[in-house]
Amino acid sequence: MSAEPVRFTREGVWRGFVLAQPLAPGVAVYGLVFGALAGERGLSWLQSLLMSVFVYSGSAQLAALQVWSAQSSAVLALVLTVVAINARYVLYSAAIQPWLSQVSRPQALGTLFLLGDGSWALSMKEYAAGYRDAGFILGTGLAGFIPWIGGTLAGYLLASEMPDPRAWGLDFMLPAFAAAIGISMWRGRSDLAPLACAAAVALPLALWAPSGWTVVLAGLAAGVAGALRHGR
C-alpha cells in the first residue's frame, strides 16, 4: 500500500465525481420513486425535498413513509426506523476514519454528510489501492446527492402524471434494495444467526404490528445476534 500522505484537493473531488457517475442514473430513479410516494403519502414538495436533503437515505426515507402519520404516536416509530436503518453509517464513518482524520474538521464533516452506500464502497476501494486524496470521498458523495435531490423533486412534481407506483411495483424498491445490500454483504454461514433472528421477529410482527416497528425490531434482533456472535 502506498505511503502517500493524505490530502484534500479539487482534483480529488472531481475524480470521485466522475468515477461515481455510473451510479447517478440509478440514484435519480430511486429519488423519483421516493418523490412520487412522498406525494402520495401527503407530504408537500418542500417536506419531501427537505427530507431528502437532511436525511439523505433512500432506504430510511422509504421505510419512514411506511409509518408516516400526522398523529404524534407515529413519531417515535418514524424516528426509530430512520435511526435503525441508518446505523450502518456509524460503521461506514469508522472505516474511513484513517482517511478523514487527517483533513480539517469542516472538510471531514462536510464529506460525511454526503456519504452514501455507493460513495463509501468506491472510496474504500480507492483507499485500498493506495489513493490518498480525501476529496475523492466528497466527489463521490456529490455525484449521488445531486441526482437524489433532483429525482425527489421531479418525482413529486410528476406524480400526478405517473400511474400508481404500486401498479408498476415501484413500492417494492425498498425490499429489493435491502435484499441487494444483504446479498452483497453476505459472508457465509456466520451470517445465518442474525438472518434467522431477524426473520423470526419480522414474520410474526408483519401480521400484528405496524410495518415501521417490524423493520426496527427485526433490525435490532439481528444486531443483538451479531453482537453476541462476535462477543464469544
Image: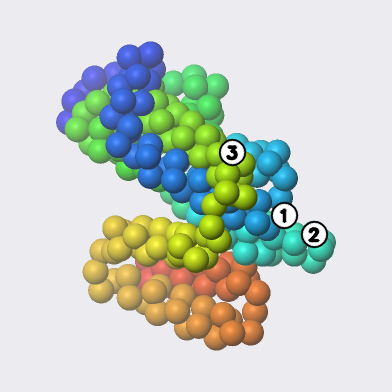
Q: Which residue is mark 3?
A: 153
**Measured Cα–Cα span from mark 1 to mark 3:** 14 Å
Residue 124, picture quadrant: top left
Q: Residue at x 68, y 41 (%)?
A: 45
Residues tagged 1 and 2 counted as in contact (Cβ below 8 A): yes
Q: Residues within 10 Å of mark 3 (few under 14, many from 20)?
A: many
Residue type, mark 1 in image: Gly
**Visible residue check, residue 149:** yes
Secondary structure beneath disc 3? Answer: helix
Residue at image mark 2: 70
Who comes first in sequence, dot 1 or dot 2?
1
Q: Position of residue 32 (x, y in %)?
A: 51, 46
Q: Which residue is mark 1?
A: 42
* Figure quadrant of residue 225: bottom left
The percent coordinates of residue 189 (x first, y second) are: 25, 74
Return the x and y of residue 125 as percentages of the image width and height: 25, 38
Which residue occupies 42% across, 43% down? 27
- Disc 1 crowd rating (10 Å Cα; few below 14, some 14-19, many 20+) is some
Does residue 96 sit above or below 162 in this rendering? Answer: above
